[in-house]
Amino acid sequence: MRSTPHHLPPPQLFYSFFKTLIDHEVIVICKNDVRIRGKLISVDQYLSVKLQDIQVLNAERFPQMQSTTTCFIRGSVIRYIELPAAAVDTALLQDAARKACLAQA
Amino acid sequence: MPSTMDAFIPGSAPILEYIDNRIMVAVRGNTYLYGTLRSYDQYGNIVLQDTVERVYYRQSYAEAARGLFLVRGQVISSMGRVDPQREHDTHARLQCRAFADVEADADAERQALSDYAQNKPCAV
């Protein structure tokens, strides 16, 4: 699979998908191992996210972030995002992925 | 205003509401800067005023004044608005020490952790 450089707008499927998760609680795991739980406020086309009411799950390792309540995380430093399973319609997502694939071919 | 700006500068839109606020910026390589956000552009480059670099080590912390900063968007990993009350509460519990000492302690611990991670027996 071809990875998308950060300066090019990537395909919009996951952007739309993450927009449906706005106002849900997610856990973001960054490449520097910070784990942040918070309410998803916004997402942009690079999959940068903005969280509110954040809680750093490994605060003993990262005390620097304890003084913040909202944060913006650049898409390029995110390793994983843990999603609320109840809020994800996997059948719909699979369907959308197929459609996007067909549209590209 | 926010909606038009959102469309105007793609990719860095959510930063707008942090402007003129005291924010925390995590820079790649374990550097944390605290300053007032004055400006940003479409690459996510930002200008910080009255910047302070802060290091933590166990029950202590230290600060070094750094002045005016232009931080390149590429090296920013995250940023967030600082809640003065939370900041005060956190620091009340910690001991303030000289910057060089805390930095040396924190570096030593990070080095020890990465040595351990490289030498530990393989799980499988």
Image (spheres, helix red, strand yellow):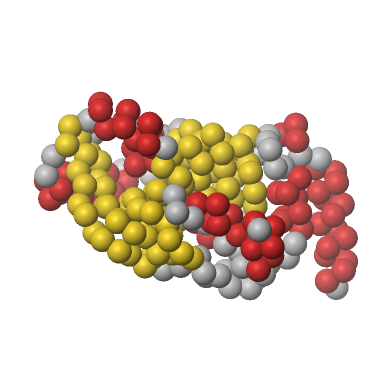
Q: Nearer the viewer, residue B52 or A90?
A: B52
What is the quadrant of residue B12 in the picture? bottom right
What is the quadrant of residue B27 in the picture? bottom left
Asked if one can make out residue B62 in the rendered structure from this viewpoint, the answer is: yes
User: Which percent across, then down, holds residue A87?
Assistant: 75, 35
User: Which percent across, then down, holds residue A72?
Assistant: 52, 50
Give the number of marks. Answer: 0
Asked if one can make out residue B123 in the rendered structure from this viewpoint, the answer is: no
Instruction: Identify which residue is drawn at 40% across, 64% down.
Output: B47
On screen, residue B92 above or below A91: above
On screen, residue B16 above or below A60: below
What is the quadrant of residue A5 in the picture? bottom right
Q: Nearer the viewer, residue A65 or A29?
A: A65
On screen, residue A24 above or below B104: above
| Quadrant of the drawing holding the N terminus of chain B | bottom right
Instruction: Identify which residue is drawn at 48% across, 33% down.
Output: A55
Q: Nearer the viewer, residue A62 or B44?
A: B44
Instruction: Identify which residue is drawn at 15% across, 48% down.
Output: B99
Q: As drawn, is A97 to the left or to the right of A58?
A: right
User: Which percent across, then down, holds residue A50?
Assistant: 58, 48
Q: As drawn, is A2 to the left or to the right of B117?
A: right
| Quadrant of the drawing holding the C terminus of chain B | top left
